[in-house]
Image (cartoon, helix red, strand yellow):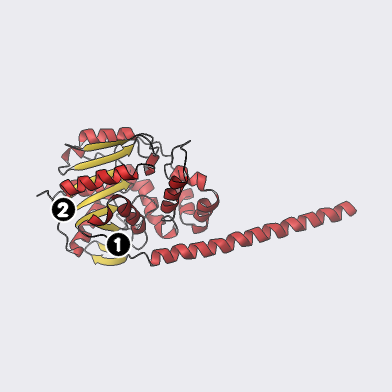
Amino acid sequence: MRNLKIAWLVAGALIVAVAIVALFVYVRYRREIRAAQEHLKNGGSQVIDTDCGPIEYAAFGEGYPVLVVHGIFGGFDQGLVIARRNAGEGFQSIAPSRFGYLRTPLPEDASPAGQADAFVCLLDALGIEQAAIIGTSAGGTSAIQFALRHPNRCSALVLFSSNTPGETEAVLLPEPVSKTLFKSDFAFWLMTTYFSSSLKSIMGVPEGFELTPEYEANVAEVMKTILPVYPRSDGALFDMYVSNPDINSGYPLEEITMPVLIVNAIDDPLTLYKNAQSAAERIPGAKLVTIESGGHMLLGHEGKIRSEIVAFLQEYASTRP
């Protein structure tokens, strides 16, 4: 009888402990997801009506216009991070939220080609005749389509850690699982807060890559552009199951006519270096910048990459007739 009482006391204590931990986790989640929502609300974006429908965008810097196209789980906020790191204030960086991200709706017939056309609609609405474009990761697909479909509107193309035709080592979750996971802010908050090591592989940090405090800070900055994930979920699912695979549907890279800069790390586990090499060989006059290590985020080479991109844009972006 005494042992039974002790067992009940231990079980009760465990239940109370679990409840306290759960309450602590929930309170922290509510506080941090509200902060993420406020960060988006105050991020400086606006929605503009275009001939292709409403498009959310934010702008940064002054000078020649450059469209900055975010990757998967992104939005205008991720585009601004990319712009500040890689273009600086010497250009007018325009960071749209792509189809299905944040306040840009996902059309029923969404495609990378349609997204490229929407970039033109955004430029038209802003009164911009021609712009350079920077595409990274999943955003590279529509950036390539922009260059192919609208060469008179695209003065230069930069692809870094970009989706390009070829093999992939990415493993897709079953779509019903992804739909459940991507629409849960709480699940993604748990991953970024308590299981960040697993999320780092999703973000393209190579296995065994040593993360210094500086690299950890860079990864954390990009992770902040994932939450809240629910308003990005339609775009992420579109990228994963429609846009990314579309790159292997026969894009005629040989027909790209504007100057092209491609930057890719040899150890990138998401956008393979051999695919970047192949794209550089197929695109007439393309320049390939090889980064020895750093994975998908090109960690540790920010200065070199920024100088390459800025020099390329200064030389080519505003001088092409």
Q: Amino acid at mark 1?
A: Ala
Q: Residues within 10 Å of mark 2 (few under 14, many from 20)?
A: some
Where residue 70 appears, as percent x and y from the top left, is 33, 52
Q: Nearer the viewer, residue 17 or 315?
A: 315
- Residue at horizontal 70 percent and vertical 58 percent from the top: 17
Residue 173 appears in the picture as rendered: no
- Residue at horizontal 51 percent and vertical 62 percent from the top: 32
Q: Is residue 233 left or right of residue 66?
A: right
Above-or-below relation of 277 to 130: above
Q: Amino acid at mark 2?
A: Arg
Where residue 225 appears, as percent x and y from the top left, is 41, 56
Which residue bears the numbered disc 2? 153
Q: Nearer the viewer, residue 225 or 139?
A: 225
Q: Which mark is residue 58?
A: 1
Element under label 2?
A: loop
Above-or-below relation of 12 to 296: below
Q: Quadrant of residue 90?
A: bottom left
Q: Is residue 121 left or right of residue 101?
A: left
Element under label 1?
A: strand
Whichever of callouts 2 and 1 sits on the residue coming sooner in the sequence is 1
Between disc 2 and disc 1, the foreground one is: 1
